[in-house]
Image: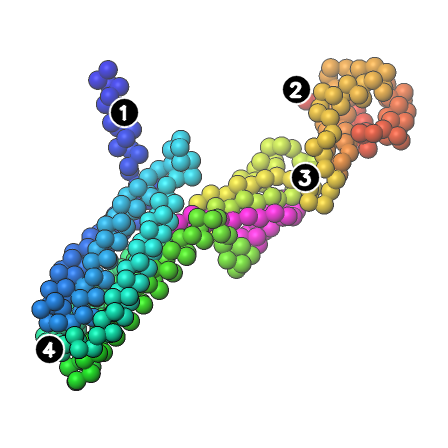
């Protein structure tokens, strides 16, 4: 019993080991840096804005606090999104990142709209607008420098580990830097006597927050509805598939995104008379080529002996045992058990290769096969080979 419990604990701990440990560690470190910076900035900006009578600085502080919440969400998504695939999630857990991006985008959009509405209400009462304290300008400058530095650091990490969510979070930090710049302009205008500019800056910050939120939410929604890769990347994958030796054509290629990876389904055409094992080898070669040259999580390759988008369907043809029974009925006797029969289902008909014993008389069989090919509903071609069937 103790061994069973211990094994279960090991399974649970293994499930939380990240599939990409380097990416997971880098993302966690950069996110914790962002959490600390945003925590400090949000407190300083809100307090300084409140006592310094700057609505725009307070709005920027709320923006920093929203970033703090989004960073916590990133940590959660990064941990659970990097778990290995399991029985319930055979494609992994990367879509957790997408869901987190959707939640983050919707939250930012709501916050931005709320700030715009609040600013609009305050502008209706200009007598309530006050001059701000000069120290709020220095707080805004410090916030700008901190956010721009955080953006450059996080973008470098995101590009190194190739994480869509970290890229989004980095550009979110850049939007924060831009909003701090707007706040600086608004505070300077207020200090110069145009007191309404501080509130206008707060409204602009709200617009920026809402816009970024809508962008994040839109991208996440596109991924959740299985939007394909862009045309350039699809064209590159198509060229990679066609370049593999043994691939005679490609008539269907589908892609869909999963976080910063992609899933690919492809139908390739091979010579219909090669062996099953060679067809499988070609499929594995095409899969390896795409995985090697493109940022793809997995490739599903379907082998076709012909372009089934144009050829007549084969699905209505009888299965092997029924076809052999039909053939033997038309021949008037069964072929020896040592005979190897290779069937080719092509363009709505069947072509059969018959490998016969060396001592079998072929004259009568050839005549009967010719008669069958002339009018048979199933068989288009029957080819006889004399030799010893392989064991």
Q: Secondary structure at mark 4?
A: loop
First in sequence: mark 3 vs mark 4: 4
The answer to which quarter of the image holds residue 371 is top right
Quadrant of the image containing the C terminus: top right
Magenta stretch? Answer: 236-262
Mark positioned earlier in the residue sequence (3 or 1): 1
- Residue 201, compared with residue 159, is above or below; it is below
The residue labelled by disc 2 is 391
Residue 167 visible in the snapshot: no
Counting from the top left corner in percent of width and height, residue 81 is at 33, 43
Tell me the quarter of the picture where residue 199 sits: bottom left
Residue, disc 1: 8
User: How many angstroms separate mark 3 from mark 2 (CA)?
Assistant: 25 Å
Position of residue 334 relative to residue 91, above or below, is above
The residue at which mark 4 appears reads as 134
Q: Is residue 172 magenta?
A: no
Q: List x then y, in percent, for residue 267.
A: 60, 43
How far separated are the C-alphas under marks 3 and 1? Answer: 46 Å
> Is tag 4's residue or tag 2's residue first in the polypeptide sequence?
4
Return the residue at label 3: 305
For marks 3 and 2, the one nearer the N-term is 3
């Amino acid at each position: 019993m103790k061994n069973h419990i211990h094994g279960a604990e090991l399974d649970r701990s293994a499930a939380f080991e990240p599939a990409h440990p380097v990416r997971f560690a880098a993302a966690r470190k950069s996110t914790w840096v962002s959490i600390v910076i945003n925590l400090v900035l949000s407190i300083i900006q809100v307090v300084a804005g409140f006592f310094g009578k700057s609505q725009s600085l307070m709005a920027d502080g709320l923006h920093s606090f929203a970033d703090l919440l989004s960073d916590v969400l990133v940590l959660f998504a990064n941990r659970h999104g990097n778990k290995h695939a399991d029985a319930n999630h055979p494609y992994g857990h990367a879509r957790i990142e997408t869901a987190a991006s959707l939640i983050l985008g919707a939250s930012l959009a709501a916050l931005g709209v709320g700030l715009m509405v609040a600013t609009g209400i305050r502008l209706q009462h200009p007598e309530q607008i006050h001059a701000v304290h000069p120290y709020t300008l220095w707080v805004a400058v410090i916030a700008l420098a901190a956010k721009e530095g955080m953006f450059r650091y996080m973008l470098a990490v995101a590009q190194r580990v190739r994480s869509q969510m970290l890229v989004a979070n980095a550009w979110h930090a850049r939007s924060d830097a831009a909003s701090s710049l707007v706040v600086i302009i608004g505070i300077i205008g207020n200090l110069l006597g145009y007191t309404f500019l501080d509130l206008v800056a707060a409204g602009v910050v709200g617009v920026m927050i809402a816009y970024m939120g809508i962008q994040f939410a839109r991208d996440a929604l596109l991924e959740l509805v299985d939007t394909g890769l862009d045309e350039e990347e699809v064209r590159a994958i198509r060229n990679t598939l066609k370049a593999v030796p043994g691939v005679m054509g490609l008539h269907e290629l589908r892609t869909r995104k999963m976080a910063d990876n992609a899933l690919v389904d492809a139908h390739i055409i091979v010579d219909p008379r090669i062996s099953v094992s060679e067809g499988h080898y070609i499929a594995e070669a095409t899969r390896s080529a795409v995985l090697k040259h493109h940022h793809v999580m997995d490739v599903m390759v379907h082998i076709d002996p012909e372009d089934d988008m144009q050829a007549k369907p084969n699905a209505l043809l009888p299965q092997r045992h029924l076809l052999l029974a039909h053939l033997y009925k038309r021949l008037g006797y069964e072929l020896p058990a040592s005979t190897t029969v290779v069937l080719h289902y092509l363009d709505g008909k069947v072509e059969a290769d018959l490998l016969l014993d060396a001592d079998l008389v072929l004259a009568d069989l050839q005549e009967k096969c010719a008669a069958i090919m002339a009018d048979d509903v199933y068989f288009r071609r029957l080819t006889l080979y004399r030799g010893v069937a392989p064991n």
